[in-house]
Image: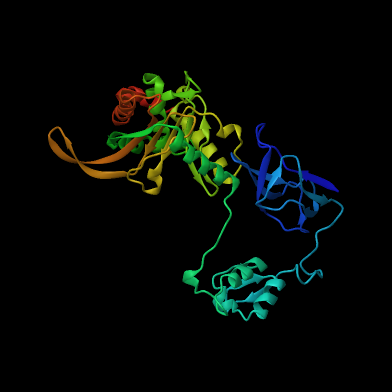
């Protein structure tokens, strides 16, 4: 019997939750197969089978369990049972034909409860791909006396994951423990758009990734932080810690919630290096492969709500950092240029900051410094040798 223990996501973490089991108790699993997802308050990890065999699940999903406790055991000397082999009727799923010619799976126990309570698979479980006991019991519990609530009046209740609960606590703490203010500006994106159009094909061919706006803004932020060191600082008790490097957090939306992977020493990176690192960390975040180390630290954060169509927002600080930049959607607007009205591609930007450490002059000046670099990328950021700056 092989014991599979709960791994430690980091030194400071003593308890985690199994977000979901990817296999069922008694299933045959292969060696190195992912069998569960584990969540801490900072990261998501995968639990992997250390051998092939029959799995015996000991830890329930959604309940906190100590690190290094036994999550499951595997009997290595068992073989895979084919679908044709006899099984317990309450374990084997059957496939029934839906009236709309759509095949759905249903467990025998779920089918029996449906029959005993005179429910209709076609009406009460329309759209389901798989029906289990819990689905049927949820339908029954939501019923009025003797009848099922109409489909448009139903609801589901899902327990918040440990990661989501921690995010919620941190966001509320920011509002209560900082003097957060937000200043806004707008940026003419025309020159950056033209620059990308000119070099995007060569950039992608050379580096294997697209040249996005996030890498350009990361470069502009890193340069601007050198001018305004208080924006690149944190409060530690009664001390202020200033950093001579830029570790930029890039906010990434995932199915598990908002994650902020950290790019280390962006002040030393080229656009290509920034873009490659962003792509790698974003993929890790979405697939749950990101490590705790890649999520900790950071001196500044950038969040791009524009990818979801946001025109303007007030980003919330990522503690203990003192500032965060919010990027937004690029929209054509009429702008006065040299006393003439022109249609330009414009973006609103927002800087939320902790007023305890950053004054209005620094916050506004920092945002203007970013605006200057984005609007004049050749003269203010890349220099005349643009191809060398883009590593082409």
- Quadrant housing the C terminus: top left
Q: Position of residue 279 (x, y in %)?
A: 51, 38
Q: Residue at x 58, y 54 (%)?
A: 159
In the displayed structure image, the side of residue 313 where residue 141 appears, left or right: right
* Label tally: 0
Q: Is residue 69 visible?
A: yes
Of residue 215 and residue 66, the one placed in the foreground of this image is: 66
Counting from the top left corner in percent of width and height, residue 317 is at 44, 35
Image location (x, y in percent) of residue 278: 49, 36
Location of residue 295 (image quadrant): top right
Q: Nearer the viewer, residue 207 or 77?
A: 77
Q: Is residue 173 left or right of residue 368?
A: right
66 is higher (above) or lower (below) than 118: above
Q: Nearer the viewer, residue 142 or 213?
A: 142
Residue 71 screen position, x and y as percent: 75, 47
Residue 282 shown left or right of residue 222 in the figure: right
- Name, please, the residue furthest toward the left: 339
Residue visible at 57% across and 41% down in the picture: 284
């Amino acid at each position: 019997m092989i014991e599979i223990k709960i791994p430690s996501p980091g030194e400071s973490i003593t308890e985690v939750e199994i977000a979901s089991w990817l296999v069922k108790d008694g299933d045959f699993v292969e060696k190195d197969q992912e069998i569960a997802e584990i969540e801490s308050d900072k990261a998501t990890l995968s639990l992997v089978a250390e051998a092939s065999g029959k799995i015996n699940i000991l830890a329930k999903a959604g309940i906190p369990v100590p690190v290094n406790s036994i999550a499951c055991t595997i009997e290595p000397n068992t073989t895979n049972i084919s679908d044709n082999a006899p099984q317990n009727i309450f374990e084997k799923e059957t496939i029934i034909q839906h009236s709309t010619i759509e095949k759905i799976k249903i467990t025998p126990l779920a089918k029996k409860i449906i029959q005993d309570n005179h429910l209709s698979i076609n009406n009460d479980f329309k759209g389901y791909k798989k029906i289990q006991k819990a689905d049927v019991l949820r339908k029954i519990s939501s019923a009025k006396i003797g009848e099922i609530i109409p489909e448009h009046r139903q609801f589901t209740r899902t327990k918040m994951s440990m990661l989501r609960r921690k995010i919620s606590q941190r966001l509320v703490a920011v509002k209560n423990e900082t003097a957060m203010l937000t200043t806004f500006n707008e940026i003419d994106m025309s020159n950056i758009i033209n620059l990308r159009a000119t070099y995007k094909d060569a950039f992608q061919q050379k580096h294997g990734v697209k040249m996005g706006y996030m890498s350009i803004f990361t470069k502009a932020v890193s340069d601007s932080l050198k001018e305004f060191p208080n924006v690149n600082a944190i409060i530690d008790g009664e001390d202020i810690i200033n950093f001579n490097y830029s570790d930029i957090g890039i906010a990434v939306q995932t199915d598990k919630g908002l994650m902020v992977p950290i790019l280390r020493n962006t002040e030393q990176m080229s656009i290509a290096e920034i873009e490659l690192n962003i792509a790698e960390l974003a993929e890790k975040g979405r697939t749950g492969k990101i490590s705790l180390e890649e999520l900790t630290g950071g001196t500044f954060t950038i969040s791009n709500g524009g990818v979801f169509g946001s025109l303007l927002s007030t980003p919330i600080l990522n503690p203990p950092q003192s500032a965060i930049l919010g990027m937004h959607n690029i929209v054509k607007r009429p702008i006065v240029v040299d006393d003439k009205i022109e249609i330009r591609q414009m973006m609103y930007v927002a800087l939320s900051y902790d007023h305890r450490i950053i004054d209005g002059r620094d916050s506004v000046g920092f945002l203007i410094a970013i605006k200057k670099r984005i609007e004049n990328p050749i003269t203010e950021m890349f220099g005349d040798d643009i191809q060398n700056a883009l590593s082409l």
